[in-house]
């Protein structure tokens, strides 16, 4: 029998770069995104947004709005009377200050762009005209636009309940005797790191189409979210509905990167308006709104020091982390998402025997912060890698040897941060990355008229956050598990639900590969269903590289249960013991000396139920869940970057980029490479180009892609990817996550390469994005 196309030589789908199921639809324009949905009598929504960063609302007059041609209705907070969005940590008052985010601002606005009212019209142009007619009166307050201003607390607080503008202040670790370690150490090195505020910039902006279904007594919302069940919960609570009265559906989605893994306000307001008017409502965010008023990320400041022995062994780490979280806590993660992540995982791939850290989240008059691909790891990896570089320089050692001296090499390893690291290839990835650059000649490369530098970054990425790991953050809402249901039809094909959600990761293909291997059928016989809260019992969505590790494991477990059902039915029909049956790998069950195709078994299960065992009901369906009992699994990688600096312009060109990654068993190697390349592009963007800045009045200064500098293909180099494979022991197929690693390593690798090129100047840069002016000034003043 000829091998089906795409199968590996060992007869498995997992590990094969098969044709992706999504591609024909998406590449030929047959995808269906939120903005493709048009319903009869549909209205279009636009938002009146605050022009002030910090002010009391004196009045909102929408009377002239309602007179604009095409406008059907306009509502402010009092009109819609919705409940607030509140995310909580179960921590004492000195560690966490809860704040609520109203769906529409009332009494006070806290950032420029905050939604104040919603306008509904027969077309989007009339809706925008209506927005222009709104009259909003403000009593301006002094805005808080920086970390320093927030901590000074000299002016009016962003939230009255947080007079010091600190929402989270937690010291997770403080090793006893750490001060003595620093006192006695051979060498103590210090670094600071500042990272600019960024936008995740998914290709598809946020949006929603909502309608009230009288027959189902249900508010149906089509939206591009990574967390549909959380949107359902918050919408139901804000609107005073039972959860069964809300159905959230996610069509094709053009990227998320974390910006869509929190619950936004605008979709809730649009849905509430649709329910009130009994007409469908569409809201699509424009790019200006996305850049200025959507969830942002990344603005962080680290002050860190590390103690080293004379031969380069790290003895202690002490860090202070301050994250500017903007005006509100995001749901469900709260403002603690960034400082708690950094505090818990900063030691990264290194053996750190003593550790102390303080993590704070401050609130400012800027758009609120949501998780963005990597969540603090690009920042703390930058800190750790710069500490290694600084220590090597002061000790007169090779920086890669200092890393090798400190890398975790024996597994499982229980860290000072109380996290157990499962087996990885930390040393091997560093060695291979260096070898590739050496073999290609980059370590001795020179450029006429330019200065060449080489930088590295070693890191791990926790990818299997189960309920236990999230519970350690003391979130009131604790993500973790995933549920999957599988059903076989009469023709032997199966439909599998998953609580995860694809927004570009090829779940329709990779999950089908996992299930196909479990059942021994073609991956084209597997249909993956996601993004429908009525069809999927519950799910936490996709973020933190959890999809394959947790969602894929749940789907695999459900398929295994269905396989057991098929074997049991075959044993009954063939009159043999269950132990005498096995799936034959070709869509059937061997039972003794007979082989029963799945189609024959399904025929009995549905159409000839009288042949079933007395204690077995009709149908072929199974449900399974999966959670991680411990600390999760860790992918790891080393990135190597070669840059050339132009003394005349301060420009930075990336000449070569190498990524050696280990995500366990790669379900689909080309998908993994795509994830790595896309993540590296975003990491380079943060290192060199992208930043949302504000003026002294709290006005965003990057309202379009003219000001928000996004790299093009000309600035992103070709990336060489090498794979290592350390299987995970407790996920289906040994897979670890691969979604965030590219982004995590790139800023540190680029910054280290630039600083290596600047070493002769005595200047070491500590801020991203790296400013051309700073590079130019350093080179101009160099001897």
Image (cartoon, rainbow, N blue to C red):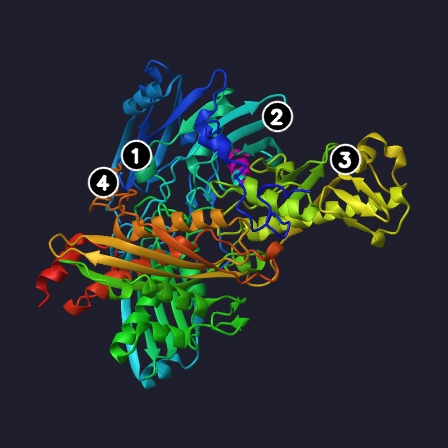
Q: CA distance from mark 3 to mark 4?
A: 59 Å
Q: Which mark is residue 370?
A: none
- Left/right placement of residue 186 relative to residue 608 reads left
State if disc 1 and disc 2 touch (CB < 8 Å).
Answer: no
> Element under label 2?
loop
Q: Which residue is mark 2?
A: 217
* Range of residues picked out in magenta: 232-240
Question: In the figure, is residue 292 to the left or right of 86?
Answer: left
Q: Nearer the viewer, mark 3 or mark 4?
A: 3
Which of the pair 124/383 is nearer the observer? 383
First reached walking from the N terminus: tag 2 or tag 1:
2
Q: Which mark is in front, 1 or 4?
A: 4
**Helix, strand or loop for disc 4:** loop
* Residue 103 shows up from this direction: no
Residue 635 versus residue 667: which sits nearer the camera?
A: 667
Distance from disc 3 to disc 1, alpha carbons, whole Å, reads 54 Å
Q: Residues within 10 Å of mark 3 (few under 14, many from 20)?
A: some
User: Which numbered disc flags the more N-terminal residue, 2 or 3?
Assistant: 2
Q: Is residue 235 magenta?
A: yes
Residue 146 screen position, x and y as percent: 26, 53
Nearer the observer, 368 or 737: 737
Label 4: which residue?
A: 707
Q: Which mark is residue 599?
A: 3
What secondary structure prevails in the magenta region? helix
User: In which quadrant of the rendered view does residue 589 lie?
Assistant: top right
Residue at 61% x, 62% y is 729
């Amino acid at each position: 029998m000829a091998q089906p196309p795409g199968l590996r030589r060992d007869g498995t789908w997992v590990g094969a770069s098969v044709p992706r199921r999504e591609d024909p639809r998406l590449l030929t324009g047959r995808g269906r995104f939120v903005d493709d949905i048009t319903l009869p009598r549909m209205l279009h929504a636009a938002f009146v947004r605050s022009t002030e960063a910090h002010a009391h609302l004196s009045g909102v007059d929408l009377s002239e709005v309602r007179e604009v041609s095409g406008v059907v209705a306009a509502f402010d907070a009092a009109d819609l009377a919705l409940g607030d969005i509140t995310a909580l940590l179960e921590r004492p008052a000195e560690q966490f200050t809860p704040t609520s985010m109203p769906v529409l601002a009332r009494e006070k606005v806290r950032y420029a762009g905050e939604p104040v009212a919603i306008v509904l019209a027969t077309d989007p142009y009339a809706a925008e005209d209506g927005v222009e007619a709104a009259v909003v009166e403000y009593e301006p307050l002094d805005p808080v636009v920086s970390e320093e201003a927030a901590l000074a607390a000299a002016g009016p607080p962003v939230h009255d309940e947080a007079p010091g503008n600190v929402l989270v202040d937690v010291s997770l670790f403080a090793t006893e005797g750490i001060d003595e370690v620093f006192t006695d150490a051979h060498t103590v090195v210090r670094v600071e790191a500042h990272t600019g505020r960024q936008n995740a910039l998914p290709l598809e902006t946020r949006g929603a189409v909502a309608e009230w279904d009288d027959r189902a007594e249900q508010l149906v919302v089509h939206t591009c979210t990574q967390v549909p069940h959380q949107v359902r919960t918050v919408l139901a609570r804000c609107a005073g509905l039972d959860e069964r009265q809300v159905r959230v559906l996610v069509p094709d989605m053009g990227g998320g990167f974390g910006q869509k893994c929190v619950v936004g306000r605008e979709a809730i307001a649009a849905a509430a308006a649709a329910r009130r008017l009994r007409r469908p409502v569409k809201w699509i965010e424009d790019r200006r709104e996305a850049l200025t008023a959507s969830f942002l990320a990344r603005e962080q400041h680290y002050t860190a020091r590390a103690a080293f022995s004379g031969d380069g062994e790290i003895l202690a780490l002490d860090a202070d982390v301050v994250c500017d979280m903007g005006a509100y806590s995001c749901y469900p993660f709260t403002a603690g998402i960034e400082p708690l992540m950094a505090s818990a995982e900063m030691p990264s791939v290194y053996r750190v025997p003593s550790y102390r850290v303080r993590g704070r989240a401050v609130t400012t008059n800027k758009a609120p912060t949501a998780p963005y691909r990597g969540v603090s790891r690009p920042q703390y990896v930058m800190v750790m890698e710069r500490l290694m570089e600084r220590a090597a320089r002061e000790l007169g050692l090779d920086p890669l040897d200092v890393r090798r001296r400190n890398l975790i090499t024996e597994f499982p390893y229980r860290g000072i941060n109380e996290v157990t690291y499962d087996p990885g290839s930390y040393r091997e990835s560093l060695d291979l990355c260096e070898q590739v650059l050496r073999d290609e000649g980059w370590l001795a490369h020179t450029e006429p008229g330019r200065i060449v530098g080489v930088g590295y970054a070693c890191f791990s990425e926790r990818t299997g956050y189960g309920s236990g790991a999230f519970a350690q953050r003391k979130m009131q809402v604790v993500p973790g598990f995933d549920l999957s249901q599988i059903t076989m039809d009469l023709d032997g094909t199966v439909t599998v639900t998953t609580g995860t959600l694809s927004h570009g990761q090829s779940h329709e293909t990779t999950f089908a590969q996992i299930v196909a291997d479990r059942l021994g059928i073609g991956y084209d016989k597997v249909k993956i269903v996601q993004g429908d809260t009525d069809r999927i019992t519950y799910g936490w969505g996709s973020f933190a590289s959890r999809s394959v590790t947790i969602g894929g494991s749940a789907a695999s477990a459900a398929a295994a249960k269905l396989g057991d059902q098929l074997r049991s039915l075959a044993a009954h029909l063939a009159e043999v013991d269950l132990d005498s049956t096995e799936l034959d790998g070709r869509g059937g069950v061997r039972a003794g000396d007979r082989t029963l195709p799945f189609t024959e078994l399904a025929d009995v299960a549905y159409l000839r139920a009288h042949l079933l065992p007395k204690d077995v009901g009709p149908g072929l369906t199974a449900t399974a869940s999966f959670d991680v009992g411990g600390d999760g699994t860790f992918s790891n990688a080393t990135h190597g970057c070669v840059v050339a600096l132009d003394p005349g312009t301060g420009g930075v060109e990336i000449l070569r980029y190498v990524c050696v990654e280990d995500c366990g068993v790669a379900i689909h190697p080309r998908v993994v490479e795509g994830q790595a390349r896309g993540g590296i592009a975003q990491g380079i963007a943060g290192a060199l180009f992208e930043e949302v800045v504000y003026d002294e009045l709290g006005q965003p200064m990057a309202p379009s892609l003219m000001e928000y500098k996004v790299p093009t293909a000309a600035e992103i180099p070709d990336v060489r990817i090498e794979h290592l494979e350390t299987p995970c022991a407790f996920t289906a197929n040994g897979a670890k996550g691969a979604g965030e690693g590219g982004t995590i390593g790139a800023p540190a690798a680029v910054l280290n390469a630039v600083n290596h090129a600047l070493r002769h100047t005595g200047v070491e840069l500590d801020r991203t994005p790296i400013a051309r002016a700073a590079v130019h000034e350093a080179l101009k003043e160099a001897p």
